[in-house]
Image (tube, rainbow, N blue to C red):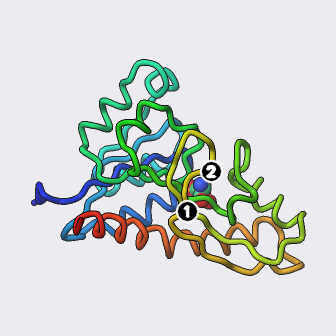
């Protein structure tokens, strides 16, 4: 039986959803926090299936429902989110959501922002750019979301090496491990700290 007093996480994901999976696993039996819903803009997103496997509502939406009609805002509100997590979500978040949930929307980015962020910097593009630049380090950035891609205040950055012989795919795998390790812990910490305020 679900406790009504649990904190609610709403996830937005556009793709595979391996980070969403980590959140679903981590909070499946958590006493204070639940994943309340997963939203996706992509009918092919495997993330939707992952949510269904955990009996978490999975909602697909259109560009119009996100940016114009206000339908997504109303649907998200219905889940009463304490935190909204963008886990591989590719669309810019509109003002109506930012205003409705100030300081409650976070994103995970697979590089050390402020470098290697912004429009088009997602997926393998990020790791290709890091390898081509000859960086010795990469990592993850978990940050609050504002009206620009990848620009909000940092919550956590974690680092990993880039080896000279790395392919973008090898680097991507190393960074993804960091994401999977840290995202559930950061989400948990944010929600439990907020609880104490
Ligand atoms: C991750 O690298 C995340 O940092 C980025 O998009 C990717 C999503 O991977 N925002 P997945 O869908 O969670 O597997």
x and y, in percent, of residue 186 in the image: 43, 69
Residue drawn at 23 percent across, 65 percent down = 195
In the visual, does 133 lie left or right of 59?
A: right
Is the residue marked 2 within 8 Å of ligand 1, measured from its CB?
no
Residue 28 visible to an observer of this rendering: yes
> Counting other residues with Cα less than 10 Å from the Cα at mark 1, is it few (<14), some (14-19), or many (20 or more)?
some
> Counting other residues with Cα less than 10 Å from the Cα at mark 2, is it few (<14), some (14-19), or many (20 or more)?
many
Is residue 124 shown above or below 170? above
Is the residue marked 1 within 8 Å of ligand 1, measured from its CB?
no
Q: Return the residue at label 2.
A: 150
x and y, in percent, of residue 96 in the image: 42, 30
Q: Secondary structure at mark 1?
A: strand
In the visual, does 144 lie left or right of 187?
A: right
x and y, in percent, of residue 7 in the image: 23, 58
Residue nearest the observer in this picture, 1 or 36: 36
Q: CA distance from mark 1 to mark 2?
A: 10 Å
Is residue 181 shown above or below 122? below
Q: Secondary structure at mark 2?
A: loop
Instruction: Using the image, tell me which numbered label, if any, was put on residue 125.
Output: none
Residue nearest the observer in this picture, 180 or 5: 5
* Quarter of the rendering containing residue 25: bottom left
Q: Return the residue at label 1.
A: 154
Total residue callouts? 2
Residue drawn at 45 percent across, 58 percent down = 20
Is residue 171 shown above or below 15? below
Residue drawn at 41 percent across, 73 percent down = 185
């Amino acid at each position: 039986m679900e406790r009504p007093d649990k904190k609610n996480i709403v996830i937005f994901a556009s793709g595979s959803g391996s980070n969403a999976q980590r959140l679903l696993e981590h909070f499946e039996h958590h006493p204070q926090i639940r994943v309340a819903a997963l939203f996706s803009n992509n009918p092919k997103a495997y993330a939707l299936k992952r949510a269904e496997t955990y009996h978490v509502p999975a909602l697909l939406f259109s560009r119009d429902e996100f940016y114009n009609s206000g339908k997504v805002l109303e649907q998200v509100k219905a889940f009463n989110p304490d935190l909204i997590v963008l886990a591989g979500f590719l669309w810019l978040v509109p003002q109506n959501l930012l205003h409705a949930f100030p300081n409650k929307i976070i994103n995970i980015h697979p590089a050390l922002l402020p470098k290697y962020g912004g429009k088009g910097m997602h997926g393998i593009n990020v790791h290709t750019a890091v390898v081509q630049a000859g960086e010795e380090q990469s990592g993850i950035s978990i940050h609050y979301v504002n009206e620009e891609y990848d620009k909000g205040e940092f919550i956590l950055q974690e680092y990993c090496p880039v080896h000279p012989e790395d392919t973008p795919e090898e680097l991507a795998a190393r960074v993804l491990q960091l994401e999977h390790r840290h995202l559930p812990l950061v989400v948990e910490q944010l929600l439990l700290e907020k609880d104490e305020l």
